Image (cartoon, grey):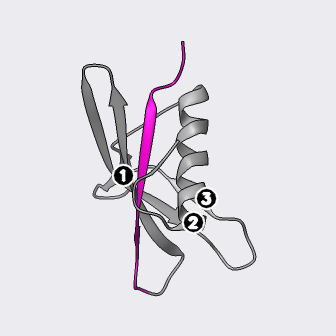
Amino acid sequence: MSLPKIEVKIRSTNTPGVTKAHADLRILLPNGEIHLIGFAIIEQPGQKAFVGFPQNRGRNKYFPVVQASGEIEEEIIKLILRAYKKDDEWEDE
């Protein structure tokens, strides 16, 4: 089964810290689309950027809002990091 078309929108942050931007996804399916909002692009000094999936803060820890695994997770991370480096709006694959 092939992966659906995924579009990425990058939203830069203007605050100091390791979260450099946020990303929103639009997953295009034959019968509609899904929007996933709030992926974090985190980059610590001297390290490669990585993607944090959306989470909600609980009382003592964070809880995932969106989870993925396998090929779709790898594709999401790849597309977000590629769009972050280009900083395009709705970069699609």
Residue 10 horizontal/vertical position (percent):
42, 63
What span is in magenta? 1-15
- The residue located at (35%, 32%) in the rendering is 28
Q: Earlier in the sequence, mark 3 or mark 2?
A: 3
Q: Is residue 18 left or right of residue 15?
A: right
Q: What's the amino acid at mark 1?
A: Gln
In 3D space, how far apart are the residues under numbered discs 1 and 3 (Cα atoms)?
Answer: 15 Å
Frontmost of labels 1 and 2 is 2
Frontmost of labels 3 and 2 is 2
Residue to which mark 1 is pinned: 55
Mark 3–mark 2 contact, CB under 8 Å?
Answer: no
Residue 47 horizontal/vertical position (percent):
73, 70
- The residue located at (37%, 40%) in the rendering is 66
- The residue located at (54%, 30%) in the rendering is 72
State the quadrant of the N terminus. top right
Whether residue 10 is in magenta: the answer is: yes
Disc 3 crowd rating (10 Å Cα; few below 14, some 14-19, many 20+) is: some
Residue to which mark 3 is pinned: 50
Residue to which mark 2 is pinned: 86
- The residue located at (31%, 20%) in the rendering is 30
Disc 1 on helix, strand or loop? strand
